[in-house]
Image: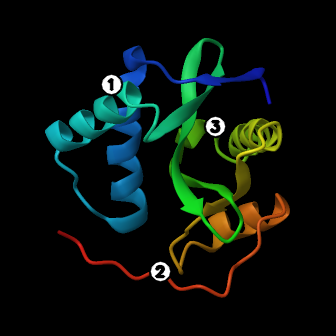
């Protein structure tokens, strides 16, 4: 990698790039066109409410080149929070160069340093075999669960 990757907490100033990344990710992975005003509102709201979740960004040469979002799920079975990774995006020119690996390793170390986090989870599209291989190399394993939803 030609640039040193630095990981940091996202700030409210990052909302435009996080919005762009979320829109691009939805288009690439699900062929969905998300409305910019809704996504930017959602990004800003999360950045203003750390009790709901947080973003981490990867920088190279002073530019944000990747991100991930974390939300929380309480597990009474484990008396701790699962951190759910969502909204993962790496700029095309920086893919396969360890950006997500650095984001994940930073997040994992952060989670392990706390006594209220019991695990890290994420979901991935069934057809996204590249992402699945990446996650497997980082020690993430498929679970026996399926995800169901009711959109409102």
Which residue is under mark 2?
147
Quadrant assignment for the N terminus: top right
The spot of residue 45 in percent (x, y) is 29, 33
| Cα–Cα gap, marks 2 and 3 | 30 Å
Side of 15 relative to 142 (left or right): left
Q: Quick check: marks 1 and 3 in contact, CB under 8 Å?
A: no
Side of 34 relative to 66 (left or right): left
Few, some or many residues within 10 Å of mark 3 (<14, 14–19, 20+): some
Quarter of the image holding residue 106? top right
Q: Residue placed at 76% from the left, 37% from the top?
A: 102
Q: Residue placed at 79% from the left, 67% from the top?
A: 136
Above or below, 14 relative to 32: above
In terms of secondary structure, where does tag 1 sit? helix
Q: Residue placed at 83% from the left, 62% from the top?
A: 137
Q: Quick check: marks 2 and 3 in contact, CB under 8 Å?
A: no
| Residue in the foreground of this view, choosing between 150 and 34 | 150
The spot of residue 95 in percent (x, y) is 65, 45
């Amino acid at each position: 990698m030609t640039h040193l990757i630095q990981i940091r907490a996202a700030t409210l100033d990052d909302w435009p790039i996080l919005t762009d990344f979320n829109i691009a990710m939805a288009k690439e992975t699900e062929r969905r066109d998300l409305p910019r005003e809704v996504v930017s509102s959602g990004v800003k709201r999360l950045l203003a409410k750390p009790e709901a979740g947080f973003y981490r960004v990867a920088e190279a040469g002073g530019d944000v080149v990747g991100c991930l979002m974390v939300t929380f799920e309480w597990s009474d079975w484990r008396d701790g929070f699962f951190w759910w990774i969502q909204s993962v995006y790496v700029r095309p020119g920086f893919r396969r160069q360890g950006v997500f690996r650095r984001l994940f390793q930073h997040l994992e170390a952060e989670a392990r340093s706390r006594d209220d986090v019991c695990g890290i989870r994420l979901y991935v599209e069934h057809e996204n075999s590249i992402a699945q291989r990446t996650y497997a190399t980082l020690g993430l394993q498929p679970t026996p669960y399926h995800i169901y939803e009711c959109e409102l």
